[in-house]
Image: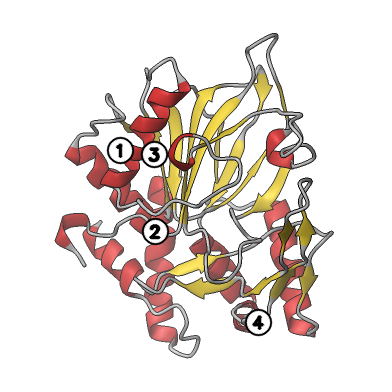
Amino acid sequence: MENLTNTIRDFDWTDLSRNDRWQDWRAAKIRASQALTSAEPVALPRLDRPHPAALSEILLRCSMQNFALYDARPTAPDLETVSRALLTFAEGLGLTVTENHRSAGHAQVVALRTSSDEGKKGYIPYTPRPMNWHTDGYYNPAHSPVKGFILHCFQQAASGGENHLLDPEIAYLRLRDENPAYVRALMHPAAMTIPENRENDGTLRPASTGPVFFADEATGRLQMRYTARTRSIAWRDDPTTRDAADWLRDWLIRGDPLWRRIRLQPGQGIVCNNALHDRTGFTDGEGAQARIVLRIRFHQRVREDFRGAA
């Protein structure tokens, strides 16, 4: 497994000319992803005191597949205690630089639940409606991209609320298989623009223009910025870019053998390098039994030092 990890981590994905390295990386990536597709979540008896072996396993999975599932049941019965435990857990994974989100509570932990609050009204994460494929923070400015996040289920919906997860490097792989020019087009610094948006409080979120695929400046690993939305988005006025966006959206609709489907139980969660994901619609329970998922976004990737590697 270590050889696979090194092959995956050391590949220069921005070089579309070297077919030998590409074929080695492609084979390693598919093999590693197949091995992890049905892997059980990593057990964490104490979320705030994860065992070093459990942390190493999560680091390994994130290095190979860009996401890992964990199971920390049972957890504390109150949001603040769980939020503190999540931040301690994140620190052990090298995730320390949190996004300053307008809806964050304790230490930038956001509680995602159905809400009619003025600042959340109309935004899909705070409704029971389904969410299409996306990476988090696709509307962020280029200088502050979201590179990782944790989703932690505090309380489950009565029904629905499933997630599909997909490694962004698999999206790159499938696009490159189809047409390497699609990858090159989506690496363009003006490939995708999210228009400006005025918040309910009058705050203006400026237009955000940037690539779909870009390199993490610390590691060189591929990062992705994407949404499958068809409204309030502008693709670069270029035939190859439009064809690439259409192909990617259609492929996500068709599905892929290497995606992961999960309905998180209370105490379970996802840690990832901003993996592609969606969410099915859901129905809340009666009274206080509403779906609550805690989310923390980070401006860095999960640490990559498995077995002492750089």
Callout 4–callout 3 Cβ contact below 8 Å = no
Q: Secondary structure at mark 4?
A: helix
Left or right, 32 with reference to 200:
left
**Up-down relation of residue 156 to residue 100 (above or below):** above
Depth-wise, is mark 4 or mark 3 nearer the camera?
4
First reached walking from the N terminus: tag 2 or tag 1: 1
- Mark 2 closeness class: few <14, some 14–19, many ≥20 residues within 10 Å: many
Type of amino acid at the residue the image marks with label 3: Ala
Q: Earlier in the sequence, mark 1 or mark 3?
A: 3
Tell me the tag on residue 88.
1
The quarter holding residue 80 reads top left
Q: Residues within 10 Å of mark 4 (few under 14, many from 20)?
A: many
Give the class, few, some or many, for how many residues have Cα within 10 Å of label 3's Cα (few <14, many ≥20). few
On the image, numbered disc 4 is attached to which residue?
185
Answer whether labels 1 and 3 touch (C-beta < 8 Å): no
Gap between marks 2 and 1 measured at Cα: 16 Å
Circle 2/circle 1 CB separation < 8 Å = no
- Local packing at callout 1 (Cα closer than 10 Å; few below 14, some 14-19, many 20+) is some
Disc 2 marks which amino acid? Answer: Arg
> Considering the image in quadrants, where does the C terminus appear?
bottom left
- How far is disc 4 from disc 3 in space, using C-alphas? 34 Å
- Tell me residue 186's x, y (percent): 64, 77
Residue at image mark 3? 39
* Residue lying at 60% horizontally and 38% vertically, measured from the top left: 163
* Secondary structure type for disc 3: loop
The numbered dot on residue 301 is: 2
